[in-house]
């Protein structure tokens, strides 16, 4: 196995472990939105490794679906709602989590199967990640407001690096990287840091409650739609 392939497997392996650990930590906190989303990222990474090492077609399809879910219909919205637990005191009803994941999964399936949507997918993914980045700007502001400056800086690094990776994903290929090996060697550590830093930043705001949770936020109306 060449050095690039070894680095590829190592970087994706670290992502799988990191996303799994912090996904379970979020589940332990009762935040099923972030916990399950992090585990979807872990499943995507594990499937990529299985496909790369064993050329298993089913693993490729699983990775492709999870990737589309995390970048498009599910990931950004679910991540924002999950983080709103510490920025707005948002606690969804148990059934709402199921509705949200089910609807996002159905939307992802329609997106990846519709040939007519193929030209629009890259821009859609980039726009959805851009929405998440805008929320992270607010999240950084909230961290600074409770003097969690180290985590505010960490989330700032997450925002810039993850947005750069999102832009590269479909719109730029590194020279000589037609198989995208170098891209994943760069991207996987960014995603690993995202999974880790967002957990600790979340905990920082959680510890600062009730200062971190503004009064009079009417989030419950969203759930009435479901």
Image (spheres, rainbow, N blue to C red):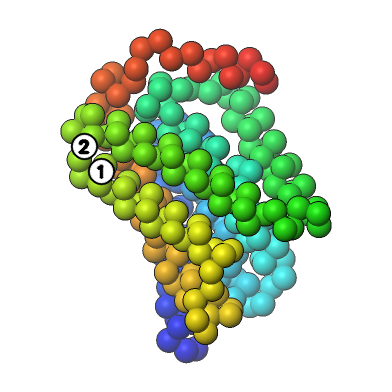
User: Against 145, is 166 above or below?
Assistant: below
Residue 130 in the image: above or below residue 80: below
Residue lying furthest right in this view?
Answer: 115
The foreground one among 131 and 109 is: 131
**Which residue occupies 72% across, 66% down?**
58
Q: Is 107 rendered above or below residue 170?
A: above
Residue 216, position as x, y percentages in the image: 40, 10
Q: Position of residue 89 (x, y in %)?
A: 40, 21
> Where residue 20 appears, x then y in whole percent?
46, 52
Quadrant location, the C terminus = top right
Whether residue 24 is visible here, answered yes or no, is: no
Whether tag 2 and tag 1 are in contact, CB under 8 A, the answer is: yes
Total marks drawn?
A: 2
Quarter-of-image position of residue 47: bottom right
Residue placed under numbered mark 2 in the picture: 148
Left/right of residue 211 with respect to residue 139 in the rendered view? left
- In x, y percent, where is residue 217? 43, 15
- For the point 59% across and 30% down, which residue is it? 97
Q: Quadrant of residue 137?
A: top left
Give the camera-side residue of 129 and 13: 129
Q: In 3D space, how far apart are the residues under numbered discs 2 and 1 (Cα atoms)? A: 6 Å
Residue under label 1, please give it: 151
Task: Please name the residue shown 60% across and 19% down the image.
Answer: 223
């Amino acid at each position: 196995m060449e050095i690039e392939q070894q680095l590829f497997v190592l970087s994706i392996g670290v992502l799988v472990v990191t996303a799994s650990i912090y996904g379970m930590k979020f589940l332990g906190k009762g935040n099923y939105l972030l916990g399950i989303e992090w585990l979807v990222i872990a499943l995507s990474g594990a499937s990529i490794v299985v496909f790369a090492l064993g050329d298993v077609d089913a693993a490729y399809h699983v990775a492709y679906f999870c990737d589309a879910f995390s970048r498009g219909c599910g990931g950004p919205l679910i991540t924002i709602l999950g983080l709103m637990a510490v920025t707005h005191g948002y606690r969804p009803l148990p059934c709402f989590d199921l509705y949200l994941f089910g609807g996002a999964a159905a939307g992802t399936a329609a997106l990846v199967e519709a040939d007519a949507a193929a030209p629009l997918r890259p821009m859609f993914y980039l726009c959805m990640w851009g929405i998440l980045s805008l929320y992270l700007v607010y999240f950084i502001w909230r961290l600074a407001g409770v003097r969690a400056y180290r985590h505010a800086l960490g989330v700032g690094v997450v925002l810039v690096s993850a947005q750069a990776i999102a832009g590269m994903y479909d719109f730029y290929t590194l020279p000589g990287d037609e198989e995208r090996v170098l891209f994943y060697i760069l991207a996987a550590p960014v995603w690993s840091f995202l999974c880790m830093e967002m957990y600790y930043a979340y905990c920082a705001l959680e510890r600062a409650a009730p200062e971190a949770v503004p009064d009079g936020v009417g989030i419950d109306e969203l759930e009435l739609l479901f």
